[in-house]
Amino acid sequence: MKAIKGSLKTSRVAVTGAAAASAVLFLSVPAFAHVTVQPEGAAAKGDYAVVDFKVPNERDNASTTKLEVAFPADHPLASVMPQPLDGWKVQVTKSKLDKPLTLHGRQIDEAVTKVTWTATGKGIEPGYFQKFPLSVGQLPEDTDQLVFKALQTYSNNEVVRWIEPQKEGQEEPENPAPVLQLSAASSGHHGSTAQDASAQDSTEDTASAASTGTSDTTARVLGVVGIVVGAAGVAYGVLAGRRRTHHA
């Protein structure tokens, strides 16, 4: 009986130890970060936005020296402008479109298909991350998201391909592609700004004209009052003079 109790106690200790070891192993596994894309503010459909590609270094013995971001071919973007970054050289690649885009009333027959950043110095060292900003537009109005594909190259020539799409209802893939979520279209798109400014200028001109008209009317009234007062003064002076002469 004692042997059975001892065996059960030993088994419990073994199970408890295994569970503790598993917990330690789970906690010791690093939380791997991914290459992601987020807007600075809003990324509204039909508008322009500034977006940041956030690139973490996931290696302890190598630096990230290159980032290539491929743009979605099904929703091409005609305008893509990178922000200068110290220690990085940037190249924007454009390609001809099968179907031209209409942007600000004119036809655009090419769009950006890839942006490449190459380190001119140490790059992204272990334990650090880097943001790569882009101004993009106009954002499409017929989709809720834009899926990019990114290649991250390390100084040891290792290439991590962040190109796997997230499928609905499934777990996140090992190397998910960066996804930019688009918000609802704003009340007035980018092009309405000029109309709003024109309307504002028109309102200001009307107010200025009204103000000028009021000032002119006031000046005229004051002028007439001044003339009347002046004439009254002259008449009073003449009458006073006559009275002095008569009494004399």
Image: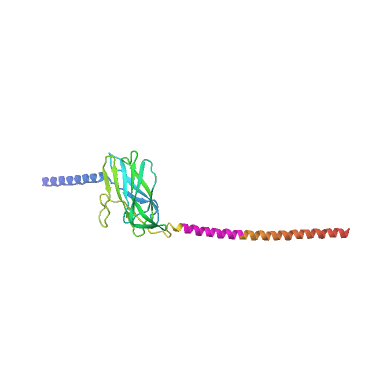
Q: Is residue 142 left or right of residue 235?
A: left
Could you tell me which residue is drawn at 11 percent across and 45 percent down?
3
Residue 7 coordinates in the image, percent (x, y)? 13, 46
Q: Nearer the viewer, residue 192 or 248?
A: 192
Q: Give the range drawn in magenta.
A: 194-212
Q: Which of 78 and 72 is in front in this view?
A: 78
Of helix, strand and loop, which mostly describes the magenta segment?
helix
Could you tell me which residue is drawn at 21 percent across and 44 percent down?
21
Taking the view exactly as shown, the residue that stands out farthest to the right is 248
Residue 164 coordinates in the image, percent (x, y)? 26, 52
Could you tell me which residue is drawn at 70 percent across and 61 percent down?
224
Q: Does the magenta stretch include residue 202?
A: yes
Q: Where on the picture, by quarter, is residue 45? A: bottom left
Please tell me how many numbered marks the rendered image carries: 0
Render colour scheme: rainbow
Q: In this view, does 6 lie above or below 210?
A: above
Quadrant including the C terminus = bottom right
Q: Does the magenta stretch include residue 187?
A: no
